[in-house]
Image: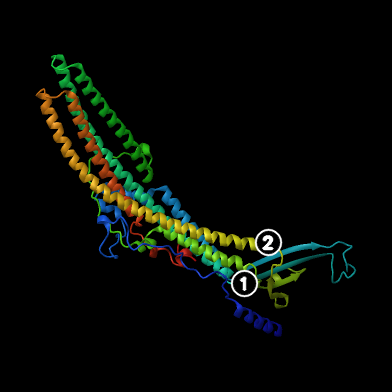
Amino acid sequence: MRTLYGFGLALGGLCLLAGCDLAPKYNQPVVDIPQNFKEVGDWQPATPSNTLPRGPWWKQYNDSLLDQYEDQVESANPDLAAAVAHYDSSRDYAAEINSVLFPQVGVGADTSGNRQSANAPLRGLKSVNPAQYSVNEGYGQANYEVDLWYQLHNEVLAGEANAQSIAAELADVRLSLQAQTADAYILLRGLDAETELLDQTVKQYAKGVEIEQDRYAGHIDSGLALVRAKTQYDLVRGLETNNIAQRALVEHSIAALVGQVASNFAIKPAVVTLTLPKIPTGVPSTLLQRRPDIASAERQVAMANYDIGVTKAAFYPTLSISAVGGLQNSNGSALNLLSLPLSIWSIGPSTFLPLFEGGLRHAAEARSYARWHEAISVYRSTVLTAFQHVEDNLSLLNNLGLEVQQLEAAIDDANRTLQLSNAMYEAGAVNYLDVVVAEAQFLDSQQQAISAQTRRLQASVNLIRGLGGGWSSDQLPGSQQSKQRNGFN
């Protein structure tokens, strides 16, 4: 009893020494953040609180079919399902790591029959050392490692940080797939508008060919005017065919995004007007909390920070406490174990201090610091890329808006040029080449306007993605959530 009492006092003294955290104090990496975005234009809100609304941001484009496809991305996209499973795996692993903080308890039983050699020592005392005997045991066992240097706690914290990082990765995958779907849908509708324009132009040019054939047959015009009309007609037919081919590829990409086989998927061509959303950007500093890829990179830095504490603690002794208690008999029935005189027990601490391992632990510590520096560099690179992404699309939105206005003016000018050319050609003042040039300019200005408007809508999608799509880092799972699976710890 005195032995157990002395052991308890010694253990209490060791526990008082426990809790020495060897991990560096964690601070989020510092990146120089500007006060305002450079390419602000009409997209900078008046107040910092004016940010993107959470939830289905794509509804701002006011297209029910796009809403339907975005819902299918959530429910049927295999890449998103894989990302969800990856996150579930990380939570399960965090729960697995968390178990090291608790005692490991188990029960067991064994029975064996044994025979000794006739030449075994003390075989002469057959009354106490028989040739054949059986051993039956039933026992319970517990083991607990005292976390003297916070090694186990840092392993748990690293597992939680990793689960939080993968949760942010999941949010980034979801946002990326949503943005890809919206971007592809906008491109498809832009191709539909351009194909409709080309189809109408082909019909107009076909009439022009018929007119020139009649004029050539009546010896009014030379064959040169007819050849020019046919050339222009064939070129526009080629452009229309190319548009149809491009649309098919975009349609196939949408099928894959919504989890459907391209062979069974189709979107009816239609010319639709999508609403260009007014996107509040907030202040630049909020970008650090609103981009899931930045949050993921920051959690990786935290995980690397905790790993340093784990590798540094490996240089110090470990302390474990083990206890075994049960019942044992020899040359008796296993059913007779339930008897107090047959009880056995063992309890005591064990410690281990590494002395020489060929540089193993020094290398592990150096590697943990290298991974920490790597994680910080990746974080800073992610932040820089995020700001580039936002500035790029702010610039595109501003300049493409101006380009659309200029192209609309060019369409009006080209239309007037075409009308004048046709009037002068019919009056015999100019040849057919002037009409061909005017028609080509009119078509080209309309195509460019459609393309600019499509790219502007795509830039708005990319800006929303760059701003995090309404996501915020406070949506990351907490300490308990990061190591929970279906409600079980």
Q: Tell me, what colour scheme is on the image?
A: rainbow
Is any part of residue 221 visible from this angle?
yes
Q: Tag 1's secondary structure?
A: strand
Residue 423 locus on image (x, y percent): 10, 28
Q: Residues within 10 Å of mark 1 (few under 14, many from 20)?
A: some
- From what the image shows, is residue 389 above or below residue 36? above
Residue 350 locus on image (x, y percent): 69, 72
- From what the image shows, is residue 198 above or below residue 259? above
Q: Nearer the viewer, residue 67 or 455?
A: 455
Disc 2 designates what residue? Answer: 359
Q: Nearer the viewer, residue 169 or 127?
A: 169
Disc 1 designates what residue? Answer: 144
Identify the residue at the far left of this view: 427
Residue 408 locus on image (x, y percent): 19, 42
Quarter containing the N terminus = bottom right
Amino acid identity at mark 2: Gly
Q: Nearer the viewer, residue 8 or 129?
A: 8
In space, the residues marked 2 and 1 are separated at their CA atoms by: 28 Å
Residue 157 locus on image (x, y percent): 52, 67
Report which quarter residue 306 is drawn in: bottom right
Q: Which mark is residue 403?
A: none
> Is mark 2 in CB contact (under 8 Å) with mark 1?
no
Q: Is residue 301 left or right of residue 238?
A: right
Amino acid identity at mark 1: Tyr
